[in-house]
Amino acid sequence: MPFVDIAYQGLGDSIDADGEVVRRFAQAACPVFVSNSFSKSFSLYGERVGALSVVAGDSAEAARVLSQLKRTVRTNYSNPPTHGGQIVATVLASPELRALWKRNLDRCAIAFAKCAASSRKSAHAAAKSDFGFVTRQRGMFSYSGLSKAAVERLRDEFSVYAIDTGRICVAALNSRNIDHVTEAIAKVIG
């Protein structure tokens, strides 16, 4: 059964473009689970606001799935936080607020793409190797391919932080730190 996770919708290309894969699965003649998150796109990191949607074959199947989901939710927590959900619901229900949110989200996506392009150019100049993965990937994060040892050196020697898998936050790069980060990466891979 397909499970589609769309945690960063709108932070890649656009809300509509990023949601295309969900629409394709939903139009297929099979059940699909779709999880989405508003934690990043609404800057509600501590709230962990999201949803699980299920496309079922018919109303009877939908009722059975809902029953099981309610049991699972009840087992995990009794009352989820409501503040973040209310914020998202208010914004999405208001045409004016939704349009403002979408414009801001589009600006973020453009800024992330510019950061990625800048980091690719800077990293190529510093490391003399192809950092094309940064611009081929979309959104706030990029898998750099750096080893755990390289990530540890980045942290210990250069105060550049990434998780052990080499996943870096492109959104944290800016004109003030891009050269330092890319030069540090060049040193740990060189």
Image (cartoon, helix red, strand yellow):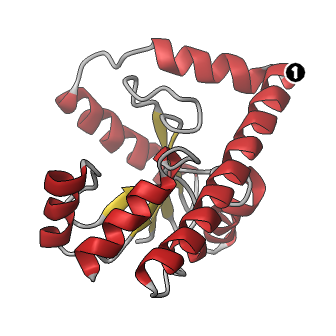
Q: Where is residue 172 in the image (x, y as percent from the top left)?
A: 47, 45
Q: Which amino acid does label 1 sit on?
A: Glu
Q: Residues within 10 Å of mark 1 (few under 14, many from 20)?
A: few
Tell me the quadrant of the picture where the N terminus can be found: bottom left
Lateral position of residue 125 relative to residue 186, left or right? right
Lateral position of residue 7 relative to residue 150, left or right? right
Lateral position of residue 38 relative to residue 181, left or right? right
Residue 101 versus residue 60 in the image, above or below:
above
Along the line of sight, the residue nearer the viewer: 175 or 99: 175
Residue at 45% from the left image edge and 75% from the top image edge: 126
Residue 3 versus residue 96 in the image, above or below:
below
Quarter of the rendering containing residue 105: top right
Residue at 46% from the left image edge and 30% from the top image edge: 49
Which residue matches tag 1? 96
Residue at 77% from the left image edge and 56% from the top image edge: 16
Is residue 152 in sight in this rendering? yes
Along the line of sight, the residue nearer the viewer: 185 or 23: 185
Residue at 48% from the left image edge and 39% from the top image edge: 51
Along the line of sight, the residue nearer the viewer: 93 or 47: 47
Secondary structure of residue under mark 1: helix
Q: Where is residue 112 in the image (x, y as percent from the top left)?
A: 62, 53
